[in-house]
Amino acid sequence: MKDWKLRMASGLLALGLVCAAPAPAMARTPEHPAGGWVTGLMDLPVVGDLLRLLTGGGEEAAAGEGASTAETAATAETATAETAETAARAAPAEAAAPQPWPQGWMQGAVQPGVELPRADADDPTLPDALTATQWAALPVGQDTLSLTSREETNFGDLTADAAAQAATAWLWQQGEATADLRSLPVAAAIPGELLTRSAAAGTALADLGGCLAEGDLSLAMVQITPARLVSVLETGLADREDPTGEGYGLFLQLSGLRMTYTETEGTARVAELALADPEEEAGRALALDDEQTPLLLVLPRACLETFGLTEAEGCPDLLADAGLTLPDALAALPANLGAADTAALLDRTAPAGRVLPADAADATFTGVVELGADYAGLQIRLLVDGREVTAVTDAQGRLTLPGLAGGGHTLQMAAGEPAYYLSDRTGVGTGAEGSVPVTVAAVPADCVLGPAPTAAPTPTAAPTASPEPTATPAASASPAPTAAPTAAPATVTVTSPEEEPATPAPTAAPTPVPAATAAPTARPTAAPIFDPTAEMLQATPDPTLAPTATPAPTAEPTPDPARLEEQEAARKTSSQLPLYIGLGLAAVGAAVVAVVLVRRKLTARSGHTYRRKP
């Protein structure tokens, strides 16, 4: 009797345990209609963990929960201060901001401790003429705008590179007398007022002296520190935008140096300074207050007193007996630098990026070039800094070039054509008020690719041109029935009368195409649709288009990604749960049987051991 009762109690206990486990989840089922009671089971503290462990969904669920938390925290509508802080911690570090100087900014700069490759003067590969226009000045009406007194230009870079190369070559020619100076970095600074005229492509290097100012152009070299160099550079920045200022024209064109500057209330200050270094793409940064690190600076001898670099102030001229001049340095550039490197310098159409505003990385502008009304609405091919681009003119024949990096750019319609200058820093060709306009004298026929791509779909836009009711009565007054097929192309050309002289040839070709298609599409012409006196006969197509508003109910709320992942995990678990429940019941039954067998054995053993004798 006792064994029977014991077995019954064990069975009821096991059944109670199995039934009690899902009971709380059953009660919570209405909260999770999509996931069912399995979702409720997975929400339980202990049972849910066991189910995730058995089904292998623990890591996925944790990852999904983390992802949804980060996503929820980033949503503006549900974000709180706490979730925003959590998302900020979880967000990856931002990528480094793009450098405001282009790669290759130190091209042509002298590297410390490296002997210059001296070329053979009879080498036929040595370039002796410019391959690109070098910019120094720009005619504006009766005046001349000095570009090099306001910003860095490619001619400024070229002259500074030539000065640095010539001074370094002289150092190496002096043997042991200058051995202690060869390991020092060499930089050059040339005031922009010394570059008076732009040099066209094809100009010989020996003739570049004619593009320089008259007077003493001898070169000097002094040894200074970065702190003193900052003072020199800020003197050059002082009056760069004020032609009436005392320091106008002292803006420095640099070689071997990169400088960024800021301007506050008209005062310019050096923000960053770096030396050219072959192992550092951004250069070797210099501390602005460094008064210990030595470097060599090459500049015109006539400017030494202006910048406070005289021998009396502790800056003796190391080139006093060298006899180097700036025109000679330009002419001797191939012999001092070599054929390949010189060719790269002469081919530069834009500045190398050595003197830049501190915010130059974000500075872009749209170049505006006037081609004339004859080129309105056309697709034009041209060269910007030697690179071929395609742009479209507007109704006035203006060519816009968006996304140009801040600074100077060279524009040509084709190779060998005249060069034009664009710059937002000097205010040339930006289209802004007060900007110097850029007008192209002639556009080669090969540069015109035809009408703009947007001109093709204009006939389809004619029916939707609601502002044209005023033009249609005049057009339909005399030839009401006969002119109906040609009404659509007529309205296109009438609405923009400026385009008739602009594109006579391109518009002649497309006209037969609308004429051929006008026959089957004669009913939906622009005039009957928008004519207030027209019959309501042609309004019949409108009701047929009304039922197309059915897509409105498609705006359904997007489900929560976390809930979708939870439901998916619940479905996966529900498909596998019967197997695990069966295994659990089998385990409980085996445990009950084992308990019964053990108790029987213990009872039998106790009966043999403690039985009383009769």
Image (cartoon, grey):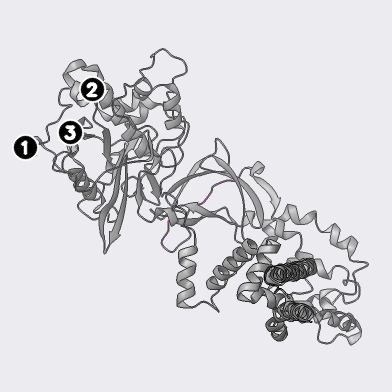
Residue kind at label 2, given as amino acid type: Leu
Residue 62, given in percent of the width and then of the height, sits at 60, 65
Q: Callout 3: few (<14), some (14-19), or many (20+) C-alpha neighbours within 10 Å?
A: many
Mark 3–mark 1 Cα distance, whole angstroms, equals: 12 Å
Q: Secondary structure at mark 3?
A: strand
* 527 is higher (above) or lower (below) than 233: below
Q: Within the magenta stretch, is there residue 206?
A: no
Query: What amino acid is at disc 3?
Result: Val
Q: Quadrant of the N terminus?
A: bottom right
Q: Which residues are magenta?
A: 434-443
**x, y percent for residue 568:** 73, 69
Q: Which residue occupies the foreground of this view, 441 or 398?
A: 398
Residue 171, disc: 2
Q: Which residue is identified by label 1?
A: 312
Dividing the picture into quadrants, the one containing residue 77 is bottom right
Q: Amino acid at mark 1?
A: Ala
Q: Nearer the viewer, mark 2 or mark 1?
A: 2
Q: Position of residue 357 (x, y in %)?
A: 35, 53
Question: Element at badge 2?
Answer: helix
Q: Is tag 2's residue or tag 1's residue first in the polypeptide sequence?
A: 2
Q: Of marks 3 and 1, which one's residue comes earlier in the chain?
A: 3
Q: Which residue is outermost to the right?
A: 520
- Residue 428 visible within the image: yes
* 22 in relation to 146, above or below: below
Q: CA distance from mark 2 to mark 3?
A: 13 Å
Overall secondary structure of the magenta stretch? loop
- Point out which mark residue 222 bears: 3
| Mark 3 touches mark 1? (CB < 8 Å) | no
- 393 relative to 427 in the view: left or right: right
